[in-house]
Amino acid sequence: MKGTALDILKQQLKDSPDLVCQPFLIDGRTCTLFYIPSIVDQAMLQKNIARFLLAESRTGSWDAFRRNLQQGTAFPVVYHAISDPEEAPVLVVQGKAVLHVDQTDDFYYFDTVQYQKRSIAESQNELVVTGPQEAFIEDIQSNLSLLRHKIRHPKLKMKEYTIGDYTNTLVYVVYIEGMPKNEVLAEIDSKLQSLSIDGIFGIGYVVEHFKESSTPFPIFQYTERPDAVAASLLEGRVCILMDGAPNAVIAPVTLFSLLQASEDYFQSPFAASWIRTVRFAFSLLSILLPSLYVAITTFHPQVLPAHLLITIASARERIPFSALTEALLMELTFEALREAGMRIPKPVGQTVSIIGGIVIGQAAVQAGIVSAPMVI
């Protein structure tokens, strides 16, 4: 190792103008406190760390201070020794306050992390009438506290991973001990341990790593609701949370779990079962209806009642395209309108999706591009 550990720390953080290096002279020896003000709890740092260092600098004995420091009694807050001095720069940029002891390679760090975060808000994508209204935010500790508020049991287990060579993003696997299959936990652990990437900025990075082959079917269930995660954990499933992501993913996933809603848990069994049946039936209709329309109008018109067949035939009289092309054009148009409604600003998005669908659909019918039954 070239140079002292202190030299290495200063070299790696030399182009960081927001770094604070605060020296304290104690009995003729110097201790230096390193931290970045924008990502630390400065009130806690000044009250529980800097104040005690100032007191030691006035009347303290160096030998007594070193002894207390090594015994873990020098400060009223928990701190840890750094086993590898080269880890000190990483801890500083993660929001820790790092203390260096003069003329040694001894470093100690304090958990002073405090990033800027938004408050717990109402779920925007999974709205319910009855039940909790809170949703996950981008701060991982807040999300874990929401889960612990739901499941207050020592068997709620969490395993921590640090992913990303540059981002050092925290990822947590959360489960209830004894409920998930060991094979599921082993596979998730193996995949996360083998994930080598420069950085991750969304939980979708983790999900894509689990896909062994290209498949259009989801292998995880996304949710932004703590109550949905808690209910899934009690069903024996596993949740993955990531720092910086306002949602979680749940595995394993089935078709029926994807058709559940958070509000189902707060209704009577009869009402929830009925709503799930309706939801499942209309999901099938949305998938099969365009195909049935093409198949019946093109190959099996005899299955339709005569008056309905005449209505469809008259509507398609001026259409220059086949029923298959007509169906594909409408599917593409609806996807374009949906994407536009999602990506443009919210006040304009709803207008575009609703008015755009009506105007474009009516214009397509009048222009003879598609038939009226297809728009309906």
Image (cartoon, rainbow, N blue to C red):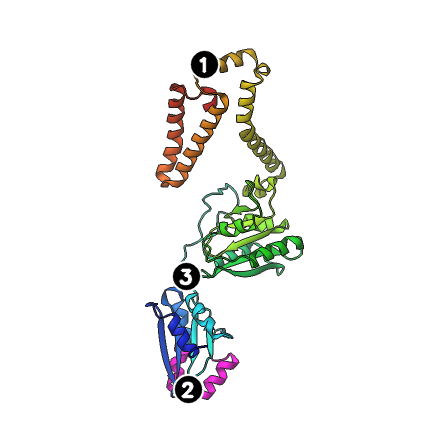
Residue type at mark 3: give it. Tyr
Among the two numbered marks 3 and 1 on one chain, the one whose residue lies closer to the N terminus = 3
Tell me if residue 318 comes above or below residue 67 in the rendering: above
Residue type at mark 2: give it. Gly
Q: Are marks 2 and 1 in contact (CB under 8 Å)?
A: no
Tell me if residue 270 comes above or below residue 107 in the rendering: above
Label 1 secondary element: loop
Residue 179 visible in image: no
Q: Which residue is mark 1?
A: 317
Mark 3 neighbour density, 10 Å: few (under 14) some (14–19) many (20 or more)? few
Q: Picture quarter containing residue 317?
A: top left
Separation (CA) of disc 3 from disc 1: 64 Å
Residue 1 visible in image: yes
Pick out the residue farthest to the front.
Answer: 2
Q: Residue at x 46, y 69 (%)?
A: 111
Give whichever of 120, 143 is nearer the camera: 143
The chief SS type of the magenta part is: helix
Q: Which residue is mark 3?
A: 115
Residue range of the region highlighted in magenta in the rendering: 50-75
Q: Which residue is mark 2?
A: 60
Give whichever of 153, 24 is nearer the camera: 24
Give whichever of 7, 38 is nearer the camera: 7
Residue type at mark 1: give it. Glu
> Is residue 51 covered in magenta?
yes
Pick out the residue farthest to the left.
Answer: 17
Q: Are marks 3 and 2 in contact (CB under 8 Å)?
A: no
Label 3 secondary element: loop
